[in-house]
Amino acid sequence: DRHGPGRLVHYDYDVEWTVGAHGFRERDPVPKRAGERRALLLGDSFAAGVGVELGSRFGDVWFRETGRAGRGETLWTLASSWCGTAQSAAILRGVGRAYEVDEIVLAFYGGNDLEDNEGWRRKVAGTAAPPSGSFRIWLRERSRLATFVWVYGLRSFASFRPPAIHSKETLDELWPDTDRALGELLEAAAGRPLRVWYLPNVSEWDDALWEEVLARHSIADPVRTGARDRLEDWCRAHGVPFADATPFLAGSRAQDLVFPVDPHWNAEGHRRVGEGLARESP
C-alpha cells in the first residue's frame, strides 16, 4: 500500500524513498534487453541506503566507478532494513526471479546480521518473541521528532551493552545459523556467480570507539573481527569471492562518516566504501 514515490524523513535527513512493486527501494522490474547483464545487490538498510539519495549508495557508487553501465549492465538492489542473510536467500528464491539477474552480491553487515540470522531461524521454528513496535509506529506517523526520540532511546539502552562485540563463545553460538543461511543463499544462486562484501560495524574501524567499548563493558575474550573472519573463511571454503570494506573506513572517526543520531553511514561513508569496492573489483 506504500508503492510509489515518497520520502524518508528523519531527524538527520530527508531523502527520496520511492518504493517499487515488491516493496524495495528499487524501480519495478522490466523485461531484460537483448545482451543486457544484470547484477543484484542483497543486504540490509546499509545496502538500501538509509539516509542518502539513490545515487550516493555504496552499491551505486561501486557500479558507477567500475564502468559497468557503459558495458550494457544494470544494477538492481533488493535490500531491506533488518534483513539478514536468510531473508536475502528467501528474496532471491522468491521475487528475485522477476529481475532475471546474472550475478548476485551479498552485503553482509557485521553489526547485526549474525543476530538477524538467529532471529530468522527462531521465527521459522516458531520460537521467536512477537514484535513490539506498535508504539514506535504510532509515534513515527505523528512526528518527525519521533525518529530522534526512538533512536536516542535505543542508544541510551545501548550504553548498557556493547554494540555487536562478540566473544568466541557467542560467535560459536551464533555462527551455525549464519552458516546455514549462507548455504541457502548459495543454493538459491543456482550456479550464478556470487560474491560477498563485508560491511563492518563502527567499532571495527573506529579505534577510539573500540577502546571506549572495552573500557565501558566487561567482555570475556572480545573478538573485534570475529564475524568478518568467519565469513571470510566460509567464502574461501566455498570458492566465493570476498571483499572486506573495513580498510576503506579505518582510521576515520565515527562522527565523520556516520549520522549524529541515526547509526547509518552518511554520503561520505558510502562514497568511501563504494569507491574502495570498485578498486578491488575484477
Image: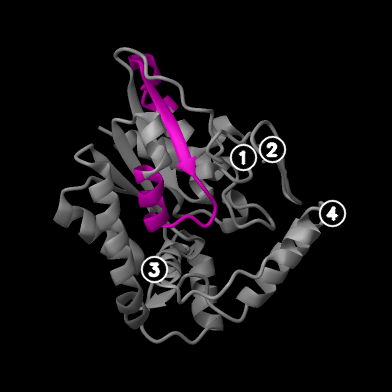
Distance between the Cα atoms at labels 4 and 3? 34 Å
**Magenta stretch bounds:** 64-93
Residue positioned most to the right? 142
Residue 241: which quarter of the image?
top left
Q: Is residue 276 above or below residue 119?
A: above
Q: Are marks 1 and 2 in contact (CB under 8 Å)?
A: yes
The secondary element bearing badge 3 is classed as helix
Q: Is residue 88 left or right of residue 240?
A: right
Q: Earlier in the sequence, mark 2 or mark 3?
A: 2
Q: Which residue is mark 1?
A: 52
Task: Tell me which residue sits at (69%, 56%) in the image.
Answer: 260
Q: Are marks 1 and 3 in contact (CB under 8 Å)?
A: no
Q: Earlier in the sequence, mark 4 or mark 2?
A: 2
Where is residue 256 drawn, in percent x and y? 60, 51
Where is residue 5 drawn, in percent x and y? 68, 31
Front-most of 173 and 71?
Answer: 173
Q: Is residue 155 above or below residue 273?
A: below
Q: Earlier in the sequence, mark 4 or mark 1?
A: 1
Q: Is residue 63 above or below residue 183?
A: above
The secondary element bearing badge 2 is classed as strand
